[in-house]
Image (spheres, grey):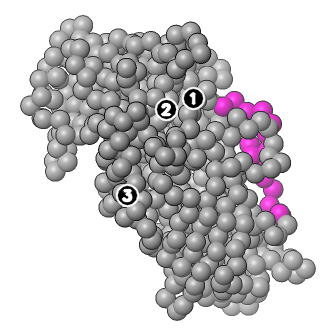
Amino acid sequence: MTSLYWKSFASACLCVTLSHPAWSAGGIEIPGYAPATGVERSYRVQKATETDMSFWFDKPGASAMTMRGAFRQRMTVLSRDEDGMRVRWSLSADLPEGMAGLADSYQMNLLYRNSLTAYGTASLELETDLNGNPRDLSGVDQILAHMRAIAASGPGGVPAAPQSGVYDIIAKLEANPLQIVAALVPEAQLLATGQSYQAETMEIGQASATSRDEDYDGVSVPVTSTWTLKSTDATARTATLSLSEEADAAAFSQSQQPAIANLMSGFAERAKNLTADQLASVKRASKNRSVELVVSLNDGSTLEASEIVTVAAGGTRLRTYTHIQREDMPASLPLPAVLTAKDLQTPDLHIDPLPSAKAGQGILDELSTPPAPPKASQTVAPHNDGPKAIAPVSLEVKSAKVVSLTSFGSELDIMLTPESAAKFQDFTQAAVGEITQVLINDKVVIEPRILTPIPGGHIVINGEQDPKLLQVMAEQLALPGAKIVVRLRP
């Protein structure tokens, strides 16, 4: 039940393999990447995501939220030949010592700990190309088997429902195991951005541009990349490079129109009152990426990297920050303020740790996907010493229709009224991490675990439901005054 809008943003923010341009003759030579084998390197990693939906919310501060995380990850190049390398990453969700602010402001660490538990591993062994770009993963069968066991047992011994989404996630990982790498160690790709197995010669201050196409749900989007050698340090034997990337505005806007339309339907009343200029602005989208890299002039390895990715669409903005520093080298790049701030406006998430012996399903979070902003109120019953109590909500349906997904079957697309959409967001904000039930005519039809708060009032029922049954439910929900009930699973 994760919002399609945020799924679109999450996919838009995934790193892609970058090719290095051919640099002009003369200048500074950046050596080819030639890491030592058998030597473990430790990296300090800091991340943050900022979401801004203030365009759609009237109450100041109710829509701009920040999540961040801080980690210490270790990497060893196990072997290297003329075809590629074998690399081991040892992963930890523990917060490094000396981080600014309170530990509970680092919510990504809690989510990441659950991800490691759900995937059943604290290390990954990768096959990479000679630049360090991941191209294969060892132990995929064991990871998938662990996830299937999680789905089969479920929390409290209750198996995951086919409609819960966990089986869809497993299927996606079977089709593309490198998504496991993107979820657990995206640092590998960012470090590889600054590395090339071939020596490159660059001149300070001279920019070199390349271009490529990226695919967004069938829309080809041209992306321009500009590389610049900013400076060198003869004493430290390092070079500082910058990379600036910009997606073609027209093509990227086109690729985001389905997500923008879905977002606007969730704010239908406000959307009806937009001026022509505001509407045009909402329908525009943009994506840019800015990276600074400190590369060793001894072995061509990336010693430090700082990346900012900004995606704007539909009157909203998502910005992600990543900073990586190899701990045996001094830092030279400035940290964005969000990574060092002691006070942040963070979402009010309830994140329970998964037990390592029997992990619950559904905490397979995409770490680049931020939670939606909370509303001012929440439908939460008074707390006591027992489990969290959250009152059920009865929601009015604006529309319901069966959508054919060709070879993927059909799904029931439900849109709530604006008032019920707000109630549903409040409920999901309070129920993050909990298993819930959606009832139609007093019958449970799906039992999803809430991963993030869900704005927009959009509910999808799919999976293995009979298309005829979906059509019956759609007809029932099309009647005047039709309602559904959402509650915690008893």
At which x and y percent is residue 264?
41, 28
At which x and y percent is residue 400?
22, 23
| 319 magenta-colored | no
Question: Is disc 3 in contact with disc 1, using a CB cutoff of under 8 Å?
Answer: no
User: What is the CA distance from the residue labelled 3 to the residue labelled 1?
Assistant: 27 Å
Drawn side of residue 145 relative to residue 334, left or right = left
Earlier sequence position, callout 3 versus callout 2: 3
Answer whether residue 489 is visible to the viewer in this image: yes
Which amino acid type corresponds to the residue marked 1 in the rendered image? His
Check disc 1 and report the residue beneath it.
350
The residue lying toward the viewer, choosing from 426 and 169, is 169
Question: Is disc 2 in contact with disc 1, using a CB cutoff of under 8 Å?
Answer: yes
Earlier sequence position, callout 3 versus callout 1: 3
In the image, what residue occupies the spot 36% across and 32% down?
Answer: 448
Which amino acid type corresponds to the residue marked 3 in the rendered image? Leu
User: What is the CA distance from the residue labelled 2 to the residue labelled 1?
Assistant: 7 Å
Q: Is residue 83 above or below residue 173?
A: below
Region of the chain picked out in magenta, as a range: 331-346
Check disc 3 and report the residue beneath it.
144
Which amino acid type corresponds to the residue marked 2 in the rendered image? Gly
Q: Residues within 10 Å of mark 2 (few under 14, many from 20)?
A: many
User: The residue tagged with tag 2: helix, strand or loop?
Assistant: loop
Drawn side of residue 401 relative to residue 154, left or right = left
User: For residue 436, which quarter of the picture?
Assistant: top left
User: Quadrant location of the C terminus?
Assistant: top left
User: For residue 307, which quarter of the picture?
Assistant: bottom right
In the image, what residue occupies the spot 33% across and 34% down?
Answer: 158
